[in-house]
């Protein structure tokens, strides 16, 4: 069972690592194994706990970008009412780009949900995915340098210039995050850089794309909490609150960080942490 101290630690860990490009699921699987916690990470309770902390993160994302989502919603209804996206309507186009970008990961996650959940109990496998996440981030930075991506100025206008196919491509990158060890934020950031967005625009797109995906996952799983009185509701709520606080701190920091900084430090961290975690957790003595 999950103690309150464990719930706070895991909640805060999720709130930080969900938005930092270093994989929340990966750390949620690995850290309990490193600390020797006896948790059944494939149990319905643990999955609900994770979804509750993700839901709290999504609420923070929605609140943080509330003005943007309001403009996106108005833009969507303008396009529906007019039967088309008017030329120069940044937020109407942004609305449809986000819809198209959300579909791939949402659909694949729904179809293959059980198979991905089975990976939660394999910390060494997760450590290898974490190394691969570091390679993905570093590769995206190398590609960016070679292509000399300019600063776009207004992130929303920069994102709105993407084609529908490019939005689908960036959204599809989020599928990698279904493997614990790969980061949703990192995958979307890498996808954004690949379609010639600058760091701040790519980060903004990744945060906007994450919100509906996380909410959808929460809506699928949270009803189970209401019909299972044997669940520890207290630790779930405490963990979700810790995740919300950590997420707010993280999003505040990252929106400033990506104005002048790159993915390279996160790539190095993932590679080194993945190697260390694998060596410590591997059942084979090396």
Image (cartoon, helix red, strand yellow):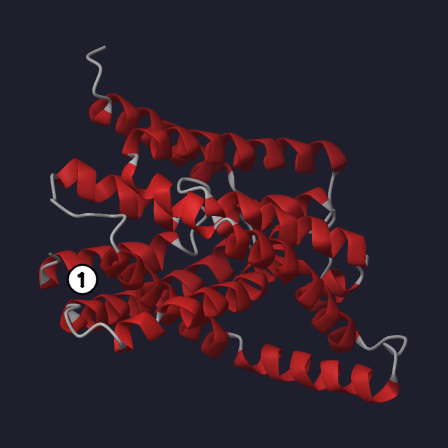
Residue that sits furthest to the bottom in the current view: 81
Q: Is residue 232 left or right of residue 92?
A: left
Q: Quadrant of residue 225?
A: bottom left
Q: Position of residue 137 (x, y in %)?
A: 53, 37
Q: Is residue 47 above or below residue 261?
A: below
Instruction: Report the residue at 19% width, 38% height from top.
Output: 33
Q: Secondary structure at mark 1?
A: helix
Q: Position of residue 203 (x, y in %)?
A: 57, 56
Question: From the image, which quarter does the C terminus lie in?
Answer: top left
Give 259 or 205, whichever is nearer the viewer. 205
Q: Position of residue 38 (x, y in %)?
A: 11, 44
Instruction: Report the residue at 61% width, 37% height from top.
Output: 140
Question: Disc 1 marks which residue?
Answer: 8
Q: Position of residue 236 (x, y in %)?
A: 21, 68
Instruction: Report the residue at 54% width, 53% height from top.
Output: 111
Q: Quadrant of residue 206?
A: bottom right
Give 169 or 9, whichever is nearer the viewer. 169
Give 27 or 205, whichever is nearer the viewer. 27
């Amino acid at each position: 069972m999950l103690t309150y101290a464990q719930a706070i630690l895991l909640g805060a860990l999720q709130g930080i690592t969900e938005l930092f490009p270093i994989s929340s699921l990966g750390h949620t699987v690995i850290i309990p194994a490193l600390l020797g916690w006896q948790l059944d990470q494939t149990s319905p309770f643990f999955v609900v706990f994770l979804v509750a902390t993700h839901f709290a993160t999504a609420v923070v994302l929605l609140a943080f970008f509330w003005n943007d989502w309001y403009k996106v919603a108005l833009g969507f209804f303008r396009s529906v009412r007019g039967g088309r996206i008017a030329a120069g309507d940044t937020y109407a186009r942004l609305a449809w780009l986000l819809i198209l970008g959300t579909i791939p990961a949402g659909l694949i996650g729904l179809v293959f949900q059980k198979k991905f959940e089975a990976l939660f109990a394999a910390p060494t496998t997760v450590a290898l995915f974490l190394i691969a996440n570091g390679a993905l981030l570093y590769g995206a930075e190398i590609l960016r340098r070679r292509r000399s991506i300019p600063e776009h100025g207004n992130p929303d206008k920069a994102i709105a210039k993407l084609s529908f196919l490019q939005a689908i491509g960036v959204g599809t990158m989020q599928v990698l995050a279904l493997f614990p060890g790969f980061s949703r934020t990192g995958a979307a950031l890498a996808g954004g850089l690949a379609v010639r967005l600058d760091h701040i625009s790519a980060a903004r797109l990744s945060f906007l794309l994450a919100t509906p995906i996380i909410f959808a996952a929460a809506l699928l799983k949270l009803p189970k909490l209401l019909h299972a009185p044997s669940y520890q509701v207290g630790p779930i709520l405490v963990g979700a609150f810790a995740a919300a606080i950590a997420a707010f701190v993280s999003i505040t920091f990252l929106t400033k960080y990506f104005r002048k900084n790159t993915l390279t430090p996160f790539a190095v961290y993932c590679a080194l942490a993945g190697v260390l975690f694998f060596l410590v957790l591997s059942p084979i003595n090396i």
